[in-house]
Amino acid sequence: MKVGIALFPSKQLQDQANSFRMRYDSHYAMIPPHITLKETFDVKEEELPTLVAMLREIAKKAQPALIDIYKVDSFYPQSNTIFFKIREHESLTFLYDQLHSEPFSQNPKYGFIPHLTIGQELSDDEHADVVGRLKMRNFEFQEVINRMQLLYQLENGSWSVYETFHLGEDA
């Protein structure tokens, strides 16, 4: 089973992201706007209870995650992905580090760049046009997210929440 771990922002932030995603994100219908903490990985169904227990412990030790969006950026030239850039914060870094150290696998492909995708798989010309326009706009948004989700991928490629974990000792 393919799983991933993410944070879902408030409805207000999801609505703002979706105003761009419905036009510029080919995965718009597959998953709501989210902040990826752990990229897709495979897990056997019989291993799910152990994974859930580990995530519950990580969530208990974590603080709610501060999300501070301050601009639009892009991963160009690696990809034509456009995103709301999120300032690094110890609450996010803690979660990322916990999910990329033993017994979890590390992410050898990319370093941690907190972001919320608003466009992907655009042509080079469309990417340049959209990024150019959005970089001229002011995007500022702050919120605290107090839940982390374990997601699983359905046969049609869409994602669904398997379990939600409240962040912090009060969870």
Image: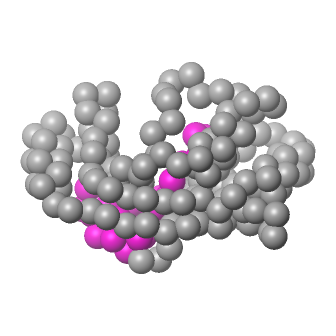
Residue 35 seen anywhere in this rendered image of the structure: yes
Drawn side of residue 129 relative to residue 81, left or right: left
Q: Does the magenta-highlighted stretch encompass residue 20?
A: yes
Residue 42 in percent (x, y) is at: 70, 37
Please identify the residue farthest to the bottom as the structure is shown.
12
Q: Does the magenta-highlighted stretch encompass residue 148?
A: no
Return the residue nearer the eye: 10 or 39: 10
Q: Residue at x 20, y 62 (%)?
A: 138
Return the residue nearer the eye: 98 or 26: 98
Quadrant (top left, top right, bottom left, bottom right) of the C terminus: bottom right
Please identify the residue farthest to the front as the structure is shown.
90
Q: Residue at x 27, y 45 (%)?
A: 73
Image height of 133 relative to 109, above or below: below
Quadrant in the rendering for residue 139: bottom left
Quadrant in the rendering for residue 70: bottom left
Residue 26 in percent (x, y) is at: 34, 52
Return the residue nearer the eye: 4 or 10: 10
Q: Residue at x 47, y 77 (%)?
A: 11
Q: Residue at x 41, y 71 (%)?
A: 13
Residue 72 in percent (x, y) is at: 27, 52
* Total residue callouts: 0
Quadrant in the rendering for residue 41: top right
Image height of 44 relative to 63, above or below: above
Which residues lie in the magenta part? 13-40
Quadrant (top left, top right, bottom left, bottom right) of the N terminus: top right
